[in-house]
């Protein structure tokens, strides 16, 4: 956090030391010097190009995207492309190994929406996360949606895929009204991540 203030005009008044300023504001002293740095222009161009390649061909993995970028003149390795894809929340669409075998330690959430007719408001809420490409960077959007009316019950934007903003949006929606079923990646009862639905 940067604090901008003008020093006293009276030369007889002493300047307040940084440590006392931080104490008065109840801030950590080191946080007064930190000035966040946005992504470089090259970083923004790289992420935009990765997103364009992925949008054209969603099955593209890091190997394919790295090859395309190298042909276009980027000096880049697969590890860097993989990291950017992970940060952007995108991955090539392909079957993984042993898809039919489930991990016995993972909790199994029942799919409560099978053969269910959704015919009234507040019956089923869904949570969805997506990212929004901006001129200089990205924002992540989470929305809690009533499946019957398609009404957005609550939403949040954040610069990172941090769990907290998802929980805030879910909590706000549940404070307004309680659905019968929550189809979500988040279990609002115990703040855990899992795929499935739960009765509230």
Image (cartoon, rainbow, N blue to C red):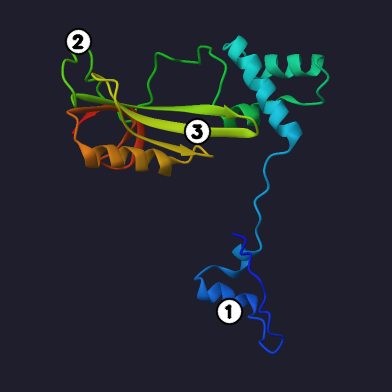
Taking the image as drawn, is residue 169 in sight?
yes
Return the residue found at the far bottom: 12
- Front one among 115 and 177: 177
- Badge 1 marks a residue whose secondary structure is helix
- Badge 2 marks a residue whose secondary structure is loop
**Pointer 2 residue:** 115
- Badge 3 marks a residue whose secondary structure is strand
Based on the displayed image, in which of its 4 quarters is residue 78 positioned? top right
Return the residue found at the far front: 9
Label 2 – label 3 distance at C-alpha? 32 Å
- Front one among 187 and 177: 177
**Where is 161 relative to 85, above or below?**
below
In this picture, residue 58 sits left or right of residue 143? right
Based on the displayed image, in which of its 4 quarters is residue 3 positioned? bottom right
Check contact, mark 1 vs mark 3: CB within 8 A. Answer: no
**Pointer 1 residue:** 20
Q: Nearer the viewer, mark 2 or mark 3?
A: 3
Label whose residue precedes the other's in the sequence (1 or 3): 1
Q: Quadrant of the C terminus?
A: top left
Check contact, mark 2 vs mark 3: CB within 8 A. Answer: no
In this picture, residue 184 sits left or right of residue 27? left
In this picture, residue 59 sits left or right of residue 149? right
**Pointer 3 residue:** 140
- Front one among 97 and 17: 17
Q: Residue at x 20, y 36 (%)?
A: 177
């Amino acid at each position: 956090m940067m604090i901008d203030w003008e020093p006293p005009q009276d030369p007889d008044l002493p300047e307040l030391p940084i440590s006392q300023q931080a104490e008065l504001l109840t801030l950590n002293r080191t946080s007064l010097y930190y000035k966040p740095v946005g992504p470089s222009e090259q970083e923004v161009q790289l992420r935009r190009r990765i997103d364009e390649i992925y949008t054209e061909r969603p099955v593209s993995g890091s190997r394919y995207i790295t090859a395309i970028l190298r042909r276009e003149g980027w000096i880049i390795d697969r590890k860097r492309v993989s990291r950017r894809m992970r940060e952007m929340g995108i991955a090539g669409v392909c079957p993984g190994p042993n898809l039919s075998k489930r991990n016995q330690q993972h909790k199994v959430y029942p799919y409560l929406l099978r053969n269910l007719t959704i015919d009234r408001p507040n019956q089923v809420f869904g949570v969805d996360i997506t990212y929004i490409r901006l001129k200089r960077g990205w924002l992540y959007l989470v929305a809690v949606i009533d499946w019957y009316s398609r009404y957005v019950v609550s939403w949040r934007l954040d610069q990172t895929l941090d769990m907290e903003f998802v929980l805030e949006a879910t909590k706000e929606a549940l404070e307004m009204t309680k659905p019968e079923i929550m189809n979500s990646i988040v279990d609002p009862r115990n703040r855990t991540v899992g795929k499935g639905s739960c009765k509230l």
